[in-house]
Image (tube, helix red, strand yellow):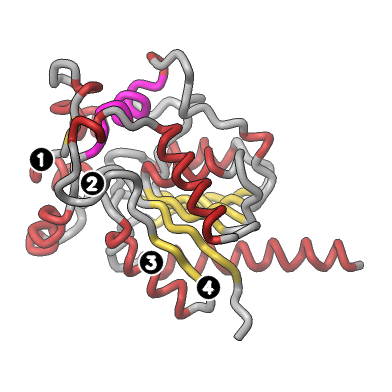
Amino acid sequence: MQTKGNILLIHGMWCRGIHLSQVHEFLEKEGYICKSIDLPMHEPGVDLQKLSKLGISDYLDFLENTLNQLGWKEPILLGHSLGGLLAQLLATRVNAKALILITPVQPKQISGLSWTGLKTIWDILRTPLFWKRTNLLSKNKFAYGIYNTLSESKQNELYPTYVPESGKIAFQTFLPFLTYSQPTRVNFEKVQCPVFVATTGKDRVTPPRIGRKIASKYTNSIMKLYPKLSHWAITEDGIEKILLDATSWIEAKTNSLDSIINF
């Protein structure tokens, strides 16, 4: 049976591939082949000292190697939160068919500062030498800034599934203006594929203005707002609407391009 294409699913900070299982299942029902991955050392029980030293370039190398191993030459890259930033950076290295960015973290060139975002991550930032450690948001901070629209029972189910994140990643992501190598800087001109950006009205970490600015950086892009969802989005009621909107828009874009090429 012919498929609609291959999609690499990239999770966000403190997460694993299993958190995108609902996304994975829905897209496969729609006719896509999906691969959900765990970013390096995102399994329970890893060496936290080694994890703390991993940075953006390590994650990108891993993702590029994953695509090479799969033999996918023109995949769709779907990223949530930090995964949305990684998808943008990865698209400057590989030939992507399209990007689907769900509440994406901003590249270096876009300011992501907000009072609600700062409140969410403040406990990490005020930890001495946090960039040399690992980190994990508290249950209260997740409830405030990440999945604030979920019921308390759903929050209680999710929180034990999260894993520590690299302090180097936190430093490069939260304070990109202090990183000399600028690992989160995206060369927007190198990304010529369609870019779908999903923002949410209850997002306290990457509010809609960030998604709007991200979309404005690409020549072939669209931003859509989903007012009732939080930053989490990926297991909330409404995620299927995001995925349908994204894939329908991408299919229309790629089909029109094929028609022009074959004219």
Q: What amino acid does circle 4 point to?
A: Tyr
For label 2, the residue is 146
Which residue, given by chain and number where applicable, does mark 3 sit on? 23
N-term-proximal mark, 2 vs 1: 1
Real-space CA distance between mark 2 and mark 3, rounded to the nearest whole angstrom: 18 Å
Q: Are marks 2 and 3 in contact (CB under 8 Å)?
A: no
- SS assignment at label 3: helix
Badge 1 or badge 3: first in the primary sequence:
3
Q: Residues within 10 Å of mark 1 (few under 14, many from 20)?
A: some
Q: Are the two marked residues, 2 and 4, in contact with CB atoms closer than 8 angstroms?
A: no
Amino acid type, residue under disc 1 in the picture: Ser
- Of the numbered discs 1 and 4, the one sitting upstream in the chain is 4
Q: Viewer-nearest of labels 1 and 4?
A: 4
Q: Mark 4 — residue? A: 32
Q: Position of residue 91 (x, y in %)?
A: 58, 44
* Tag 2: amino acid: Ile
Q: Disc 3 vs disc 4: which is toward the camera?
A: 4
Tell me which residue sits at (86%, 62%) in the image: 261
Let me know if residue 221 is in the magenta part.
Answer: no
Mark 2–mark 4 Cα distance, whole angstroms, equals 28 Å
Q: Classify mark 4: residues with Cα within 10 Å, few (<14), some (14-19) or many (20+).
A: some
- Which element is circle 2 on? helix
> Residue beneath label 1, please?
138
Range of magenta residues: 165-176
Q: Position of residue 208 (x, y in %)?
A: 41, 42
Residue 170: percent from left, percent from top: 29, 29
